[in-house]
Image (cartoon, rainbow, N blue to C red):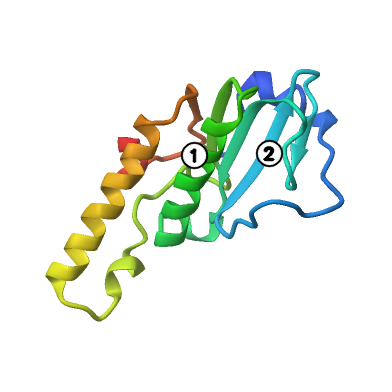
Amino acid sequence: MQARFPLFLSRFQYLVRPYSEAHGPDFQTLEISFRDASGVISVGGPPPAEPHAFCIKLNRPRKKNAFNQVMYEELMGALHQASGESSCRVVFLTGSGDFYSSGNDLANFSRIAHPLTIAKQSRKLCHDFVDSFVSCTKPIVCAVNGPAIGIAATT
């Protein structure tokens, strides 16, 4: 299955201009881009003066975009950042590769710790994660580019 962006995003791909300097947060598991009113998409770096669309791409294609603790935290931070952008009108969320997301990365649960401790930490993380979607002040549009399993289908 080939990854596809919605038509209204793909027609602006020829306007992509990457930033020459890396500013702002450095994400390990996400790719952030912004679209301004003129349709220009900026990849990486700080947002334009007035970003109208905040685009978040899950970026762990080798792991089928499985959620690990870092991705949970980065996505929560990105949604919070998008909520704080007054000129932002919408958040687009998609995945890279052939999966939107394969759900939880089971390596998260392979730590050596007491099962009750892991369950308590996981419950809080999942609660905060879902709450970040609910409390986001912008509409969230998902461009599901492949299978969405587990927590990816829930959100």
Is 88 placed above or below 130 here?
A: above
Query: Which residue is denoted by mark 2 in the rendering?
Result: 33
Say which mark, if any, is on residue 80.
1
The quadrant of the image that shows the C terminus is top left
Q: Number of callouts in the render? A: 2
Q: Which amino acid does label 2 sit on?
A: Ser
Q: Is residue 58 visible?
A: yes
Quarter of image, res 10: top right
Relative to the observer, which residue lies in front, 2 or 38?
A: 38
Quarter of image, res 36: top right
Q: Give me the residue at 61% from left, 24% from top.
A: 86
SS type, badge 2: strand
For this orientation, the residue located farthest to the bottom is 112
Q: Is residue 4 visible?
A: no
Q: Tell me which numbered mark, 2 or 1, is placed earlier along the sequence.
A: 2
Q: Give me the residue at 82% from left, 44% from top.
A: 18
Q: Which amino acid does label 1 sit on?
A: His
Relative to the observer, which residue lies in front, 9 or 98?
A: 9
Q: Give me the residue at 43% from left, 46% from top.
A: 101
